[in-house]
Image: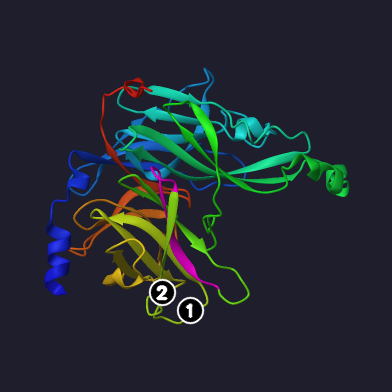
Amino acid sequence: MDMFRRNFLSKDHSYYNDTSLLLDHGTPQDGVNYVPPVLYSLFGERFENMVKIDWPNPYQVPYYFNIYGPIGVNGIFCIEDNGRVGSIGQSRSAKELGRVVLWNPATDECKVIPPSPFAFESPYWDPLINFHGFGYDQVSNDYKVVRHITFFPETDDDYENYEETWKDGYHDSMWEIYCVKSNRWNKLDLDMPMKYLNNCVGVLVYTDGVCHWWGKDTSEIGDEVYLVSFDLNNETFVKTSMPSNMDDIDSEVVYRHLSMLNGSIGFITNYAETGTFHISILGEVGITESWIKLFVVSLGPCVYHPIGNGKKGDMFFRRKDNELVWFNLNTHEIKELGLKGDYSCQILIYKESFLPLDRISN
């Protein structure tokens, strides 16, 4: 196992060829003034250097954005607008809340994805749109976005008259998928588990045409957390359970984080107020026994949550005082990045690409 660990950390995985790290940085709020997120490029031996990257402006008005997923797919990020600059806290329509853009930082090319035709057809139901994945289907040469929609009554009257409003068929939740080639949304006839957010900070990763997220069985007979893997090409999913001995510390609050670790799907568990992190990787999707626990590291109770990983053992965390730190699994060196960040901070893996999105053809 020691040899496996050394080889795992030292190998140059093709996943990281010509990649760099970005920091999607959210500033801790003071309850009075909202500070929009900032995107930085990180470089240097210990990531001591940062260069700010400007957000895109696809709507001709400055917007705040969320980046979905920790990976730029072929140099492209999937982002959602989070409000017009200067308008945070003001009411916006559901259609604005659901707007998505594909963005290539190298060329500053943006593709505004059309609104879902399913989410806004009903006059009685408001959609809650939940992003679950963005990736590239190599078989069909297509970029795709996966979302889940839950519908809620638009007004109290709609709720009270639910027997009438339910006739339009929009009371059920649904899955949808967008394809760049066709430039349209389609329904997915699937009953997949939604991503589970409670005590899970890292919940989305992408590998080779497959989107992954945490799901949870909340039935009366179980309370199981598992990995959900959705194949963008054949539109099927697989669940991978966690082994019963994965969490071997008794704690009332367990935080589970999904991430990429040296090209493998990584599972990081930490326990409230301990600063101890259990790090495992998955050998094969769908095989519970292929989870391998590689490391148990103690960083002190002041270190709260991982915010992402680089290559060859580089990991990034947020401390209790909101300070962001870098840690290396090989050397066990830990260093402050010189920034304080909130819960939304994440490390992004980015490979620069100058290929335009319109290279995809029908």
Q: To which residue does mark 1 refer?
A: 251
In which quadrant of the rendered image does the N terminus lie?
bottom left
In the image, 181 versus 2, the foreground residue is 181
> Would residue 25 be counted in the magenta stretch?
no
The answer to which quarter of the image holds residue 105 is top left
Secondary element at image label 1: loop
Q: Which mark is residue 274?
A: 2
Residue pictured at 30% horizontal, 46% vertical: 208
Of mark 1 and mark 2, the one earlier in the sequence is 1
The image position of residue 57, as x and y in percent, is 47, 22
- Between disc 1 and disc 2, the foreground one is 1
The image position of residue 308, as x and y in percent, is 34, 53
Label 2 neighbourhood size at 10 Å, few (<14), some (14-19), many (20+)?
A: some
The answer to which quarter of the image holds residue 362 is top left
Label 1 neighbourhood size at 10 Å, few (<14), some (14-19), many (20+)?
A: few
Q: Amino acid at mark 1?
A: Ser
Residue 299 seen in the figure: no
Magenta region: which residues? 223-235
The image position of residue 212, as x and y in percent, is 41, 53
Secondary element at image label 2: loop
Asked if marks 1 and 2 touch (Cβ < 8 Å), the reply is yes
Q: Please determine whether, in this image, residue 12 is positioned above or below residue 120.
A: below
